[in-house]
Amino acid sequence: MTGESLKDHLVQSLEAARAKEATLLALCDDSPPQESGHWSAKDNIAHLTTWREHAVRTLDAMRLGQPVDGPANESDLDGRNAEIYEAHRGDSAAAVRAAANDSYGALIAAVNACTDEDLLRERPDNGGPVWRVVPGNGHGHVAQHLSYWAAEHDDPGGAEDAARWTYALDTELFPDNQAVADYNFACFYARNAHADQALPLLAAALQSRPDLRAFALEDADIEPIRDDPRVQSLLGA
């Protein structure tokens, strides 16, 4: 850790996310998805943008002592994500690219408007300190979708590279949040049915944050390895 503040690290993470997302942004055009049921690059960018906009509203509301406004039902992510898809699938690629750029500027401005005290304030929905909405809707979310994109395009190496990139960034910039980084990296391996790689990361996460066990018991990402006796033992299932 350097003498840089949490705010500095959040801004650095967003700049890194913007640069990483550029690979997907370059593919953002008005072409439909290549396969039915898959998202186009434009769909992915619109989705990422909408959740960054949610993070802006959350930071601003917490800073101003106001309730969080806007479409963000995090208790039903599948439903909310379906709404986002329907709301933006007719947008032009040019509009989606412009909105993506604007959302990064808005989120960086929202971070800079906060004090450290604002960023450390606990969210009323028991979501932990409010600053976590930035990596969750910033580089972590970008890496997740780049990983999905690579997997859908028969590039398992690229999918793992995206997961490793966000894990390294989390470890460097947010070491106090290591348990969440371990859990998210474990989820990548779990989704791909690699129990041997997922288990040590999942064990480390649960040792540091026992409260994550309840989440893991319901997490769809864990499903491909849930029947592994070692996973069942770890989760107490």
Image (cartoon, grey):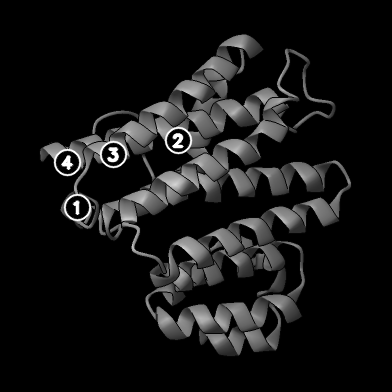
Look at 62% across and 48% down and name the residue there.
143
Where is residue 137 drawn, in percent x and y? 46, 44
Tell me: 85 left or right of 195: left
Asked if the residue at tag 1 contacts the one at tag 3, i.e. Cβ–Cβ closer than 8 Å, the answer is: no
Label 2 secondary element: helix
Label 4 secondary element: helix
Q: Residues within 10 Å of mark 1 (few under 14, many from 20)?
A: few
Q: Is residue 58 visible?
A: no
Mark 2 / mark 3, whichever is N-terminal: 2
Q: CA distance from mark 1 to mark 2?
A: 19 Å
Mark 4 or 2: the one toward you: 4
Mark 1 / mark 2, whichever is N-terminal: 2
Mark 2 — residue? 51
Work out whether 42 lies above or below 196.
Answer: above
The dot on residue 124 is 1
Label 1 secondary element: loop
Asked if the residue at tag 4 contacts the one at tag 1, i.e. Cβ–Cβ closer than 8 Å, the answer is: no
- Residue type at mark 2: give it: Trp
Q: Which quadrant, please, contains the C terminus? A: bottom right
Work out whether 103 lies above or below 119.
Answer: above
- Residue type at mark 3: give it: Asn
Asked if the residue at tag 3 contacts the one at tag 4, i.e. Cβ–Cβ closer than 8 Å, the answer is: no
The dot on residue 63 is 4
Residue nearest the observer in this picture, 217 or 31: 31
Mark 3 — residue? 112
Q: Which quadrant, please, contains the N terminus? A: bottom left
Mark 4 or 3: the one toward you: 3
Q: CA distance from mark 4 to mark 3?
A: 11 Å
Look at 19% across and 36% down and name the residue there.
61
The dot on residue 158 is none
